[in-house]
Amino acid sequence: MLPLALALLVAPGTARDTVLPPDTLHLHVGSAAVNGRVYAPHLARVRVQVGDSASAPTAEWTNELTLGDSAGRPVMRWITRGTQFAPNGNQVTWELRQTYDAVTLAPYAYQSRSSLGGYSRLTFDGPRIRGVRKLPADSVERAVDLTLDRAGFIASASDLVPLAAGLEPGRVMTAPMWSPGMTATETRIFTVLGQEPTLVEGKRWDAWKVEERRQADGRLLATWYLVTGSPYMVYGEVVLPDGRIQRITEVEVATP
């Protein structure tokens, strides 16, 4: 799962018709086909490199998942704490707290803060999003009161959706995604290509390879390598706007 600081930032492409198989699974927030109960509490460490796999890490963070209850609803709470490393040696730290429905993955709350001074505090009620947001360059916070065309899953956690919907060779699914800064959802296409042996920081996995594309133009956004136990996403390749590849590895660490 990507934090706010490293969420996919890609300009919308030119819309075109995308041909999908007739048995495509069309997901929505609240869909009975999504079962977030596949995710158990865990703590994982993520490391990011850009370009060659031997390059120095550009960011590192931890993802911690706990399960709980909110007004009778089962919820999952994610806490992400990370550091981004600039080429000049400067570091930016951040914390991201997210609350989702533990079954449907519907977002309920999203709170972020950065050492640069930016922050967001958002709550979700279906397609309506309310709260405040302040970018590092802003002198004051801004109110957020946005009603989307439809409820969306959080784009920076897009890799959670395919596993929750079930993985099998050849499966194709679509899902609406949203992230702060967007005024409408964006449909993503997930295609399960099969299982591949994947070596991640010295450990071998038989991981499910899943491509994520934007439906509007078919552009490849990311390729995820997923497993059915912690840490769930073991490797990812995100295509940056300039064409470079952001390589992401994730390993489970012991809970303090």
Image (cartoon, helix red, strand yellow):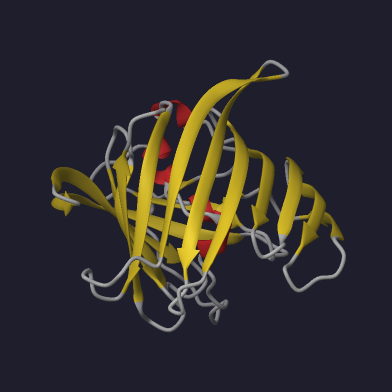
Nearest the camera: 182 or 86? 86
Taking the view exactly as shown, the residue that stands out farthest to the front is 89
Q: Residue 228's spot in the image, x, y percent? A: 29, 34
Q: Residue 195's spot in the image, x, y percent? A: 17, 47
Q: How many marks?
A: 0
**Residue at left 67%, top 60%?**
180
Taking the view exactly as shown, the residue that stands out farthest to the top is 72
Nearest the camera: 163 or 85? 85
Relative to 164, is 237 on the left or the right? left
Q: Residue 105's spot in the image, x, y percent? A: 55, 37
**Residue at left 29%, top 32%?**
229
Depicted 215 relative to depicted 101: above or below: below
Relative to 130, is 74 on the left or the right? left
The C terminus lies in quadrant:
top left
Nearest the camera: 125 or 244? 244
**Residue at left 75%, top 47%?**
122
Q: Residue 222's spot in the image, x, y percent? A: 37, 64
Depicted 44 relative to depicted 256: above or below: below
Depicted 184 relative to depicted 129: above or below: below
Query: Could one spot residue 34 in this view of the protein?
Result: no
**Residue at left 54%, top 71%?**
9
